[in-house]
Each structure stands twice: as C-alpha cells, then as structure tokens.
Image (spheres, rainbow, N blue to C red):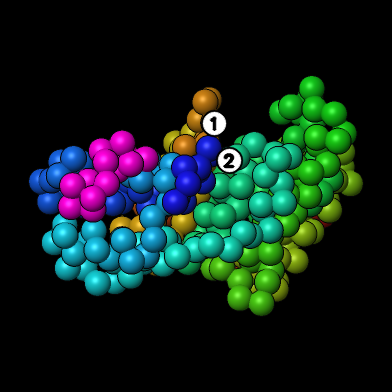
Amino acid sequence: MAPRSNPTARQVRLGAELRKLREAAGLKAREVAAFLDSTSAQMSQMEAGISGVSAERVRRLTTHYGCSDEAFVDALAAMASERSRGWWSEYRDVLPQVNMDVAEAEHHATFLNEVVITYVPGLLQTPDYARAVFRYMRPELEESQLTPRVEHRMRRRQIIEGDKPTPYETVVHEFALRIRVADRQTSVSQLRLILDEIEKGRATVRVIPVDQDGFAGADASMMYMGGPLPKLDTGLLDAPTGTLFIDDEAHLSHLRTLFRTVRGASLDPSASRDFIHRLAKEL
C-alpha cells in the first residue's frame, strides 16, 4: 500500500499495537521483514501507521507473533479493513488533523466518559456557545475559518443523537455551567440544551458543585473512549502542545481511576438535573 503523508490517530494506533505484539514476541523488525519478504523500512512505516496493512496481513503477523487472543486479533483485523471515509473527511483540508482524529475516535467508541472543568462539553454545546469559545481561544480566526469549526463540532453530536447513540456520561463542574462565554441568552440556551439532552436520555450528566468537599481535580479534564475490547480503549487529554491520544495501559488505568474519583465527587444524575434547572432559572 502507498505511504500516507498524514496517517490518522486510529491508523497510528493499529501500527502501534502490531509493534507491541512484535516486541512482546521478542522479534526484531528486520526478522519480521524477512518473514514477510519486506524491508525494515517498510516495517517501520507499517508500525508507524504511515503504510497501510491488510486484514490478511494482520492475521498472518499475529499468528507469527504467537498471539492467541482471537477477539483482539479480530478487532485489529477490523481496524485494518476499514476503508470508508466518515463525514469528518469533508473537513480534511479545512481543519487541523486532530479534529478528524477526535471525530473518528468518537465514531468508533463503544462508550464515552468525559470530565470537563472549564467549559461545557463539546458534545453538548450549542452553536452560539461553541462559536464564542472558538472566538475567544483563537481570536485571529477569520469567519471563514470559524464557521467550519462550529459546524464540525455540531456534527460530532450525531454520535449521541443518531439512531444508535453511543452511551455518554460526563462530569461537569459548576464553574463551566456558570461562566458566560458570551451573553446571558447564550448561557440560558446552553443550559436548556443540556437539560433537553438529559431528558431525551442522550447524556448522563453529573455536576460537581463549587462547594463540594473533597474535589481537587481542577486539571482533571479528559475523555475516555471505550474500544471493542478494553485493551483498545483510548484516552484524550488536552495539553499545551495539543490533544494527546493515550493508549498505553498504565495511563489508561490512571484515567479510569481519575474518572471514578471525579465521578464520586459529583451529584447523582437526578440531583445534577435539578441543579442545572435551578441554575437556568437563576440566570
């Protein structure tokens, strides 16, 4: 397969999983390259996601590596077989690659758990709220650059609003609900949208009040995406250098623990709904 100039995060993940299996088997890249009648350079490209790999080759490699986890092999083969281009590909020459990577990862997730401290979660934002956030964070953007970002964010919501919605649970700090990124009407409309999504069963929302004892997670914002198997789960973290995709088990375990800890400091869904309702009336 021809080398890719800009592999997606999902393609990179597939290559990384194959590399982990090779290393666990104690094999060098050059040894596997000889087995495949290939080259070390081509092996490196495949394991970096730069070169594609067929489902047939995935199965041949995993057998060579002695991997007996059939469900895991099937999941990797399914990743290799994906050839369709999702709706996000329409923005490939318009928005940064990370926007496509996030949308693709959400599309394939079996569940979504999120913690947000400073802003309303992107999957629950109204167009006006999203526009205000983008405008504040990137004041240099022209309207022609701002509009597709808002559109892309709105289209991401189809994963919780479609025919087969992905289970979505988010923990939101009261601060994120109270802060006015634009004006009063934008804030009120935003809270009403959240309440509407809750009532329709599209989102489980938990609120952490500002007076909640035992919460020290001001930097706890994260997204955890379930994979077809736990070992293919993915974490997302926002960092100064951009969005980080997490796939190693040690960090995933930390994110799972973090979500449980933050979740434990939040109100239950019923009390959270009532809290948001009162806040909307106050505004």
Q: Position of residue 186 (x, y in %)?
A: 85, 46
Q: Is residue 26 above or below residue 111?
A: above
Q: Determine the image quadrant of residue 214.
A: top left
Q: Going by the image, does 100 lie left or right of 265?
A: right
Asked whether residue 68 is in view, the answer is: yes
The residue at the point 41 percent across, 67 percent down is 78
Mark 2 to mark 1: distance in Å? 8 Å
- Local crowd at mark 2 within 10 Å, few (<14), some, or many (≥20)? some
Asked whether residue 279 is in view, the answer is: no
Dot 1: element: strand
Q: Determine the image quadrant of residue 232.
A: bottom left
The residue at the point 75 percent across, 66 percent down is 196
Which amino acid type is shown beneath numbered disc 2? Val
| Tags 2 and 1 touching, CB below 8 Å | yes
Is 35 inside the magenta-drawn segment? yes
Q: Position of residue 211 (x, y in %)?
A: 56, 42
The residue at the point 31 percent across, 61 percent down is 57
Q: Which residue is mark 1?
A: 242
Q: Going by the image, does 74 lie left or right of 7?
A: left
Which amino acid type is shown beneath numbered disc 1? Gly
Q: Which mark is residue 101?
A: none
Q: Position of residue 79 (x, y in %)?
A: 43, 61
Q: Nearer the viewer, mark 2 or mark 1?
A: 2
Q: Which mark is residue 98?
A: 2
Residue interval drawn in magenta:
33-45
